[in-house]
Amino acid sequence: MFRLVRFEVYKLFRLRSVRLGLLFALLLPFLWALAPGLKEVYGLVLASGWQVVSLSLLAGMEFLFPFLVVMAASEALGSEVAQGTLKSLLLRPLSRTHLLLAKLFAVLLYPFVLLGASFLGGVLAGMPYGLGAFYGGTGLGEGGFAGAGLLSPQAALAELLRAHLLAGAVLLPLASLALLYGTVFLSTTASALAAVATLLLMRLLVAFPALTPFLLTTYLDLYLRPEAVGLGLPLLLLYTLGFALLAALVFEQKDL
């Protein structure tokens, strides 16, 4: 099983879309570090390199990172079908469940690698601004970017690591949902569109207040609200496992 998981991780990270996604995540912070209009548009004057890291996370989580994760998870099965390699894989003495679990592990790993690339790019891009103590905030803690006084590099790093880990948890159910639709449609485009449409539909369900605390979309900004971790994190993991279980059931019955 370990060899299968390693093989699926290797295949996923060989996909052009995945490698491009990692490159975009790495380069995104340099746009913020070099942007001349931060003060005019956002009212922000960079005081520390740590703020570059948080700006990249905030900007990426608005659309780019969820989109990249959904596309990668959709392509995990869709590319196999398009290349005609899925049937040959299933001819081996290998259960469909084991194959899907290996793919699931790979797509659930990708969000954290993606965020790691963004974090690394942010640190590199922010070095000219310094990574020491500074007056201000990371934008992810008390006081936002204005902060609440002198912030030590250790405290800034802790805030950023916590936010990136929570952002990774936010992306897990999106990857699992896209993989589920991948088993249903066996198409990269169709599964990605279905995953995005499902998220948009969930957003509309906020019109039903009784459902709001249990909606996946309620916690897509969990990395900004660590106080909601108590309910939000278990719910995100429950969605991830639920989508994965449905994907396994569909894939076992799918006529290929």
Image (cartoon, rainbow, N blue to C red):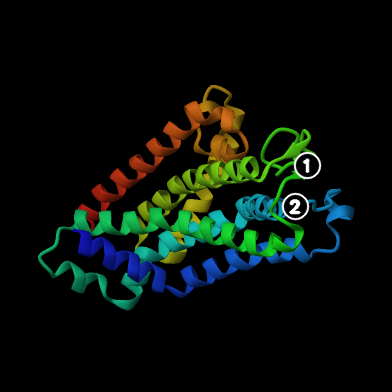
Rounded to the nearest angstrom, the CA distance separating label 2 from label 1 is 8 Å
Residue 48 numbered mark, or none: 2
Spot occupied by residue 163 in the image (x, y as percentages of width and height): 57, 43
Residue drawn 35% across and 74% down?
82
User: Which is more toward the observer, 122 or 187?
Assistant: 122
Give yes or no for contact between labels 2 and 1 (Cβ–Cβ under 8 Å): yes
Examine the rendered structure and indicate whether residue 231 appears above or below residue 131: above
Examine the rendered structure and indicate whether residue 233 appears above or below residue 130: above
Residue drawn 50% across and 37% down?
216
Label 1 packing within 10 angstroms: few (<14), some (14-19), many (20+): many
User: Which is more toward the observer, 50 or 59?
Assistant: 50
The residue wearing badge 1 is 136
Amino acid type for the residue under numbered disc 1: Gly
Q: Quadrant of the N terminus?
A: bottom left
Residue 148 numbered mark, or none: none
Q: How many marks?
A: 2
Disc nearer the start of the sequence (2/1): 2
Spot occupied by residue 48 in the image (x, y as percentages of width and height): 75, 52
Residue drawn 58% across and 28% down?
227
Amino acid type for the residue under numbered disc 2: Ser
Examine the rendered structure and indicate whether residue 73 appears above or below residue 219: below
Q: Quadrant of the C terminus?
A: bottom left
Residue drawn 20% across and 53% down?
97
